[in-house]
Amino acid sequence: MERTEFTVKGMTCGNCVNSVTEALKGVDGVKLAKVTLEDEKAQVTYDPQHTSLEQLKEAVKAAGYEVA
């Protein structure tokens, strides 16, 4: 398992946090996803044999948010 953290821009409320969290959890290989509105961060624990950091970021973008 690997752990990564990146900034998510465009979240304005709890529903945004839920949307990003669900998008990340929907990626194959993601074990844990924690998203916080206050510091605009996503912390993800994932299996690098099933997904990549780029795929995680693409899932966030597909949900309508920016990754910094």
Image: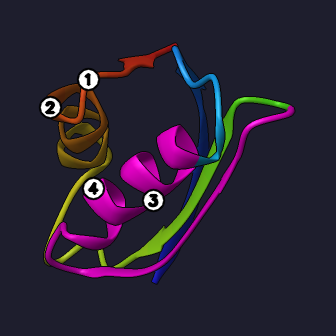
The answer to the question of whether label 2 and label 3 lie on touching residues, with beta carbons closer than 8 A, is: no
Magenta stretch: give its range: 15-38
Decide whether residue 16 is among the magenta residues.
yes
Q: Marks 2/4: CA distance? A: 8 Å
Compared with residue 23, is residue 68 higher up or lower down, i.e. above or below? above
Which of the two discs, 2 and 4, labels the residue nearer the N terminus?
A: 4
Give the structural element (helix, strand or loop) at label 1: loop
What kind of element bears circle 3? helix
From the viewer's side, name the closer residue of 41 and 52. Answer: 41
Q: Mark 3 sits on what residue? A: 21
Q: Residues within 10 Å of mark 2 (few under 14, many from 20)?
A: few
User: Residue type at mark 1?
Assistant: Gly
> Which residue is labeled 1 in the image?
64
Q: Are marks 2 and 4 in contact (CB under 8 Å)?
A: yes
Q: Is residue 48 covered in magenta?
A: no
Task: Please name the amino acid that badge 2 sits on.
Answer: Ala
Q: Which residue is mark 2?
A: 62
Q: Residue at x 28, y 48 (%)?
A: 56
Task: Residue 37 in the image: state x and y as whole percent.
Answer: 74, 37
Q: Are marks 1 and 2 in contact (CB under 8 Å)?
A: yes
